[in-house]
Image: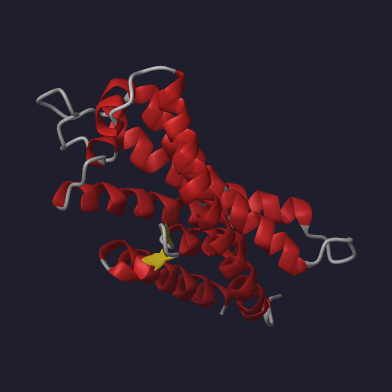
Amino acid sequence: MLKTRRLTLTAIFLAFIIIFSFTPLGFLNLGIIKATLVHIPVIVGAIILGPRIGAFLGLVFGLLSMTVNTITPSILSFAFSPFIPVIGTTQGSLWAVVIALIPRVLVGIIPYYVYKWLYKPDGTLSQKWSLFISGVAGSLVNTLLVMNLIYFLFQSAYAQVTGISVGGGLYNAVLSVIFINGVPEALVAGIVVAAMTGPLLKMYNKNQP
């Protein structure tokens, strides 16, 4: 019974990741920016099903990101797909695989341990707050790693994209993305994870031996 619930939930989370990756449903319009929702099923899946399945869901998220950036490239797609030429060159880079996969796999691992560390049934922090913080942490892992890896691995190309010369000003552009896009995304992730995960945990653990 437990194995069936585990497989069912894994399939549901995979379906959401696929749908969110290939449709506008994966983005929430906050006015000035759009917050991505694709990482949320990875975070929820990690907390409920554990870090192994969480890492698998994160890997799928990363592979789909690579696929989307290859099929429908944007100005920064060279940082997520090795098949898109880096700006200023005629070929792609394998470092794009690192950016596309490693942060996303960690999104499926870190929230689980944050939640386990924060939430104790007899502790002072409620389950909802523990889930909220875990969701925020998972989202920030993605944003911080992706943006910093782009800066360090594709500094010259990112400078051309932003029109800012390499140096302190360029990293300020990275920080702007983190605060303007990353923080709202993290808050959205925290709210959704806090709302969804509690009932799903109760359902998953029901009648568990």
User: 12 above or below 135?
Assistant: below
Residue that lies at the very extreme toward the left in this rendered image: 90
Whole-percent x and y of residue 182?
50, 48
Whole-percent x and y of residue 174?
44, 34
Q: Please state if 68 lies on the left or on the right of 106 as rendered.
A: left
Quarter occupied by the N terminus? bottom right
Q: Can residue 52 be seen in this view?
A: yes
Q: Which of 77 and 43 is in front in this view?
A: 77
Q: Please state if 135 lies on the left or on the right of 102 as rendered.
A: right
Residue occupying the point 25% across, 27% down: 160
Residue occupying the point 41% across, 58% down: 32
What is the tally of numbered marks visible in this picture? Answer: 0
Q: Which of 137 and 199 is in front in this view?
A: 137
Quarter occupied by the C terminus? bottom right
Residue occupying the point 16% across, 37% down: 84
- Residue 89 placement: quadrant: top left
